[in-house]
Amino acid sequence: MKIKDLIDATGAKVLKEINEELDVSISTDTRTIKPGDFYLPLKGVSFDGEKFIDEALKKGAVGAFCTGDNGTLRVEDTLEAYLKLANWRRNRLNLKVVAITGSSGKTTTKELVASVLGEKFKVFKTPLNHNNEVGLCQTIFSAPDDTEILILEMGMRGLGEIELLSKYSEPDITIITNVGTAHIGRLGSRENIAKAKCEIVKYQRGNVFIAKNDELIKKTVDFSGEKIFYSIEDVKILEERADYSKFEYMGNIYELNVGGEYNIENSLSAIRTGLELGLTVQEIQAGLKKYSPIEKRWEAVTAGGYRVINDSYNANPESMRAFVDTVLGLYRDYVLVLGDMGELGVNEVQYHRELGKYINNHSNLDKNAVVLSIGQLAKNITDEITVCKAVHFENIEQSVDYIENSIGKEMTLFLKASRSMKFENIIKELNSFKQ
């Protein structure tokens, strides 16, 4: 961008004379800033980037945004300026934006959609954990100039956040994977969660909305364009194993190198997106076949001599039940290792107890199975299980010690918890034991 573009896009007031024809890149971090960059300081609860303007200039920045008088261009809010700049670039790249949100499954869906659309287009997608306002800007600025499809994952912690992301990304196609109970502690009800998720269409420029077939989404979304609703009920599953699925949808056969009905259902949004963007069935089939799970998303590893399936990227009641259904439906000789689910509000204990009851009463539960829980809330899961062996631990170290001394190597360990539980440390601890 030229300096004059920065001024035009943000409406900034020029405080110091500068060559407006200079080409610059935006940097928000003085640790990585390069000579010739233009510094955009961000503010947070515990940091204020404007305190580092002098440092940025000493390192070679040609100028800096500010909200006071110590920079080159003054704006009212630097984050808003960053979003406006991202929108400026979004509108100057010859691309389409596919925006994805949902209570669960949005990261997997993003990867599935990217795998499919990559068969026909040059695709760039949101990196992991970049699904907020700053991440949106970073993603747009990181996209190569020849990007044809930009896939944006959108997260939220409250009302108004996805609307903001929609405003500055202006999606062409929007996808809602589901409306569950993730963040219900902040929003209070599924109705409010649906309202927050459906904000994704507020500034949509394109005419296609794709979502899981959910009456709450249908009732909430305010969109006049084409609405496509997909459901696992429209699928005929032909073959399913832990690491493979084959199914029929809309008269065509598709394959995935991963098991689980929820993975199949997420792939339906990728199929519908591909069809809307002109891909052939053969291209979509090839794209789905190439999909592989990302770290901590049904990730198969070997640790300490055990086969481990790590699906601990995140957890909420809906994704936990889907996880349980998959394990109990496809596996024998399994150990469920379950941890706390976060941000469930005043009913968090109830949600964990209900999960325990769901497991205990599951028609596919093997009486020889073992269920281990780790964490204060997760204790309520194993407290409800009486049909098979269920043991609770306060921490990861205790659980790993139990696994090493009481669980045979023929058992497969399945890990599921909220990210804050850091279940990847179970794998590290298992690997630290002598083989």
Image: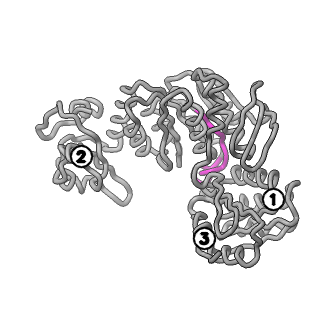
Q: Give residue 2's position: percent from left, percent from top.
A: 23, 32
Task: Point out the tag, 1 or 2, that comes first from the N-terminus.
Answer: 2
Task: Inspect the image, locate mark 2, and give the three-letter code of the amino acid beneath it.
Answer: Cys
**What whole-number distance in Å separates the C-alpha atoms at marks 1 and 2?**
55 Å
Badge 3 or badge 2: first in the primary sequence: 2
Q: Residue at x 75, y 41 (%)?
A: 245
| Spot occupied by residue 242 in the image (x, y as percentages of width and height) | 75, 50
Quadrant housing the N terminus: top left
Secondary structure, mark 2, is strand
Where disc 1 sits, the SS reads: helix
Q: Nearer the viewer, residue 1 or 144?
A: 144
Residue that mark 1 sits on: 359
Residue shown at the point (33%, 58%) measured from the top left: 47
Q: Nearer the viewer, residue 149 or 9?
A: 149
Q: CA distance from mark 1 to mark 3?
A: 29 Å
Q: Which residues are magenta?
A: 175-189
Q: How would you rate the neighbour count of disc 2 (Cα within 10 Å): few for under 14, some for 14-19, many for 20 or more? A: many
Callout in the foreground (1, 3):
3
Q: Amino acid at mark 3?
A: Asn
Q: Is residue 346 visible?
A: no
Depth check, front residue: 5 or 265: 265
Instruction: Give the percent coordinates (x, y) of residue 26.
Output: 29, 42
Which element is circle 3 on?
helix
The reply to whether discs 1 and 3 touch (Cβ–Cβ < 8 Å) is no
Callout 3 touching callout 2 (CB < 8 Å):
no
Label 3 neighbourhood size at 10 Å, few (<14), some (14-19), many (20+)?
A: some
Q: Residue under circle 3?
A: 431
